[in-house]
Image (cartoon, rainbow, N blue to C red):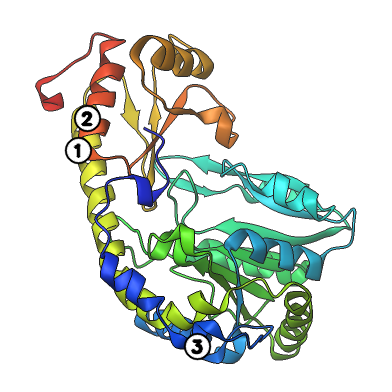
Amino acid sequence: MTQSNPTQADIVYPESGVLDALRHRQGLVYHPEPAGLRSARQAVGGYYAGRGVDVPVERILLAASTSESYSYIFKLLADPGDNVLIPQPSYPLFDYLAALDSVGTVPYALRYDSGWSIDFETLERGVTTRTRAVIVVNPNNPTGSFLKKRERGRLTAFCRERGMAIVSDEVFADYSFGADPERVESFAAATDVLTFSMSGLSKICGLPQLKLGWMVISGPDTERAQAFERLELISDTYLSVGAPVQHALPRLLETGAGIRAEIAVRTRDNLAWLRSALRDTAFHVLEVEGGWYATVRAPRILSEEEWTLELLERHNVLVQPGFFFDFDQEAYLVLSLLTAPGILREGVRRLMLMTGDVTPRLS
């Protein structure tokens, strides 16, 4: 129950729509543009317009993936030995990405109290004279928590006072489980502090194999312009984004809307079923607002490691333990809501058998 690859999760892909988009004659021509082809960046701007955010093409820069965007940003903001603040819990990728650019990471805590929020005390304690940015994941992976507007205001003031940037990873932003007027949908329209908002085809269109991501640079005019110019230089050194996928991007975004809708239905239905199945049992589904994952608090009759190994070795069920995402307490199990429904139901049934707490809701 750890499936995170939509191309292997029984999602129905419109093959002709995706493949036909790649049959663009201009894909045979190499015409490098450091920031990405203007037509592709205009398509990204159209995506944001559909979400109610005006993003001029001059603030959009393409990369091969969100991971590459992180690398570009680390190169831009930090010298070897500098550091960035990263959320905890979160997906265990930042340490590796930062280390590859000789940048350190310092965790700040997300606290849970019927919902997740930033622990600003740990954020403040983590700052040093060599801290260059705060990374936020909105919604977070795996907690599924969105930042709230009050947090954004406090975070923006925090970074502005210290001359730090905000890096907002928004790859799961289209997968929310309900409306909330207090939620921050995107940082792409930020004006007060230098901000980098990232997304890409991997999640919003369920097309990780096509390798195209982007970042939106926002903030005060002078800082934003300088950052964009320098990012262009970094990108020009690599020129990693392929021409075919850039030319295909307008049609891929159009076709991908249907894939995104199917994934959204899958994750919402799986979450609703999971909440119902585990209600009034020894297990508890933590509050989740969006994304592809659910966190289940398991009874502490076993450690996370014991739960995970017992499930795998005796019941042939694979889940991720909370410590994989740096949860600081026991015992949490992280399940992918992208999992095919039949597999999820059978996996949860086997999980419940370990406590003898099987209810009719599991049928």
- Residue highlighted by disc 2: 345
Label 1: which secondary element: helix
Is residue 113 in sight in this rendering?
yes
How many numbered marks have been drawn onto this rendered protein structure?
3
Given contact means CB atoms under 8 Å apart, are the residues at marks 2 and 1 in contact?
yes
- Residue highlighted by disc 3: 26
Question: Hey, which quadrant is residue 178 in on the image?
Answer: bottom left
The amino acid marked with disc number 2 is: Arg
Q: Nearer the viewer, mark 2 or mark 1?
A: 2
Residue closer to the observer: 53 or 267: 267
Label located before the other in sequence (2 or 3) = 3
Residue closer to the observer: 144 or 50: 50
Label located before the other in sequence (2 or 1) = 1
Q: Which residue is located at x 56 percent, y 68 percent? A: 198
How far across and how far down the image is residue 328, in percent?
Answer: 59, 30
Given contact means CB atoms under 8 Å apart, are the residues at marks 2 and 3 in contact?
no
Q: Is residue 63 left or right of residue 336?
A: right
Label 2: which secondary element: helix
The amino acid marked with disc number 1 is: Trp
Q: Residues within 10 Å of mark 1 (few under 14, many from 20)?
A: some
**Residue 273 image label:** 1
